[in-house]
């Protein structure tokens, strides 16, 4: 499933357990919902990971939109069971299990207490329908548009919302010639000290010596110390082009075909890019012309004038389908927590977050688990009481006590 997409359930605002909310506002959710609608989609249709669910549709009962539960969840890989004695439907896909009575407005997800969704299930022509808010309860990606189209999993994209991820870069922050080490900032792993004694550095740029600010391609060694910052002896280090990102402020062309682009680099500020008439811009958008407001990926040339703003003849310029407001993923909530208890049978852990208190984490198949000290994923059993974690939560918390979350990423700290 595609990651870092917007999670939107327009029917109910996400309830929070604290006075200060860490989740996106309802107004932002409604605005994004409108921009993602596909007006040509058939009303009441259902899409799962971009594919229409055939022979199934939504219905409306009063102010509630209901969905055919069996058709959807069987498509999602759940096993569906029915107990005629208790009139209870059970849906299971480890570690998730969902239960509800066909006669009551009470829905249970995993370890949570039964929760109302504003409507008991409805049975029509042998098909059981439940409120679409069930997806909010279980923390699954879903979106209902104003023209009554339900998207589950991957969301419909528009030109404005297609995203190209910025490249992860490893940047030199400090050079210690005495100890033959360099300190780098890895966009994914954080700060790391590299022991480069006796290591031959490869240069793919005009530079032929190490300098602060350079970008590196590093093949890390197998052992990462548990120190802070960790120390690693890399297998190889290569100096590569550094990418800059930012918005276009203005574009001007002269009578000779030269283009002057004022570019707001996210790190160094305003830079004037001088593009010759034969300069080839790489467009990753439908627009094939430079203009104000576009988001650029730029490899700056080595020489920068001393003017204000400085001028540069870039090596490459790419236009990305990304807006400045998307620079930071507002759907990711980070927190530091300690494991309070472990339920290996259901593959869940109960953690105490420093800000949010107790939270149950479902360790689903897509959660990304990493170790800060570089140890392999199965090197030791980290699921134990007292283990310190850094967590990237998904934006949807169930309304149970404690709330349940399907985390995006877990970093093992000790």
Image (cartoon, rainbow, N blue to C red):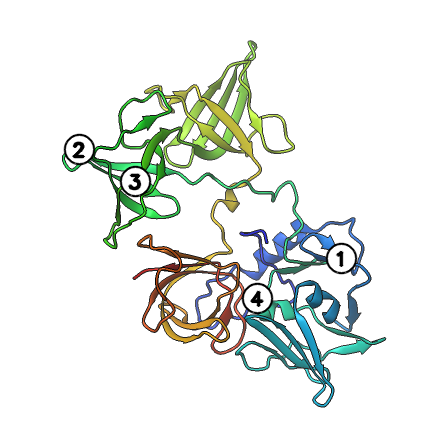
User: 362 left or right of 340?
Assistant: right
Percent position of residue 28, x then y: 57, 55
Q: Quadrant of residue 266?
A: top left
Disc 2 target residue: 177
Instruction: Give the alpha-carbon distance from disc 4 to disc 1, as whole Å.
Output: 23 Å
Label 4: element kind: loop
Distance, label 2 to label 3, CA atoms, is 17 Å
Q: Nearer the viewer, mark 3 or mark 1?
A: 3
Residue at position x 58%, y 51% from top?
Answer: 2
Tell me residue 279's x, y (percent): 53, 17
The first of marks 4 and 1 along the sequence is 4
Residue at 54 percent of width and 20 percent of height: 252
Alpha carbon separation for disc pair 4 and 3: 40 Å
Q: Nearer the viewer, residue 39 or 113?
A: 113
Q: Secondary structure at mark 3?
A: loop
Q: Is residue 44 above or below residue 296?
A: below
The residue identified by callout 1 is 147
Mark 1 or mark 3, which is nearer the start of the sequence?
A: 1
Residue at the outermost top position? 256
The residue under label 4 is: 139
Q: Which residue is mark 3?
A: 234
Among the 4 quarters of the image, the one containing residue 173: top left
Residue farthest to the left, as pictured:
178
* Residue 217 visible within the image: yes
Q: Residue at x 35, y 43 (%)?
A: 186
| Category of crowding for the residue at label 4, using alpha-carbon neighbours closer than 10 angstroms: few (below 14), some (14–19), many (at least 20) | many
Mark 4 or 1: the one toward you: 4
Q: Counting residues from the N terminus, which is met first, the one under dot 2 or under dot 3? A: 2
**Marks 1,2: beta carbons within 8 A:** no
Neighbor class of circle 1 (other Cα within 10 Å; few <14, some 14-19, many 20+) is some
Q: Are marks 4 and 1 in contact (CB under 8 Å)?
A: no
């Amino acid at each position: 499933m595609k990651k870092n997409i917007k999670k939107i359930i327009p029917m109910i605002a996400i309830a929070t357990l604290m006075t200060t909310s860490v989740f996106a506002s309802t107004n932002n959710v409604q605005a994004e919902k409108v921009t993602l609608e596909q007006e040509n989609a058939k009303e009441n249709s259902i899409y799962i990971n971009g594919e229409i669910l055939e022979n199934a549709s939504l219905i409306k009962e009063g102010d509630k939109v209901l969905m055919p539960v069996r058709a959807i969840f069987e498509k999602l890989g759940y096993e569906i069971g029915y107990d005629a004695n208790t009139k209870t439907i059970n849906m299971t896909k480890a570690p998730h299990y969902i239960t509800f009575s066909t006669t009551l407005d009470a829905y249970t997800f995993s370890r949570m207490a039964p929760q109302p969704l504003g409507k008991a299930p409805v049975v029509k022509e042998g098909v059981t329908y439940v409120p679409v808010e069930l997806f909010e309860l279980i923390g699954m990606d879903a979106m209902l548009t104003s023209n009554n189209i339900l998207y589950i999993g991957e969301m419909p994209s528009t030109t404005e919302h297609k995203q190209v991820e910025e490249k992860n870069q490893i940047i030199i922050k400090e050079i210690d010639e005495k100890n033959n080490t360099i300190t780098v900032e890895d966009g994914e792993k954080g700060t790391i000290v590299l022991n480069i004694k006796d290591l031959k550095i490869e240069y793919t740029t005009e530079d032929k010596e190490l300098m602060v600010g350079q970008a590196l391609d590093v093949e890390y060694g197998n052992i990462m110390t548990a120190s802070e910052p960790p120390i690693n002896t890399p297998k190889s280090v290569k100096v590569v082009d550094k990418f800059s990102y930012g918005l276009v402020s203005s574009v001007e062309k002269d009578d000779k075909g030269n283009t002057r682009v004022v570019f707001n680099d996210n790190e160094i500020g305003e830079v004037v890019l001088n593009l010759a008439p034969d300069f080839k811009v790489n467009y990753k958008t439908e627009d094939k012309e430079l203009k104000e407001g576009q988001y650029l990926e730029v490899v700056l040339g080595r020489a920068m004038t001393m003017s204000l703003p400085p001028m540069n003849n870039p090596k490459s310029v790419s236009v990305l389908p990304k807006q400045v407001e998307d620079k930071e993923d507002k759907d990711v909530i980070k927190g530091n927590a300690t494991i309070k208890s472990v339920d290996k049978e259901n593959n869940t852990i109960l953690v105490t977050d420093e800000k949010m208190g107790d939270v149950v984490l479902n360790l689903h198949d897509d959660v990304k688990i990493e170790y800060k000290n570089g140890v392999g994923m199965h090197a030791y059993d980290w699921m134990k009481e007292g283990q310190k974690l850094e967590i990237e939560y998904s934006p949807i918390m169930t309304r149970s006590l404690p709330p349940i979350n399907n985390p995006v990423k877990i970093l093992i700290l000790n």
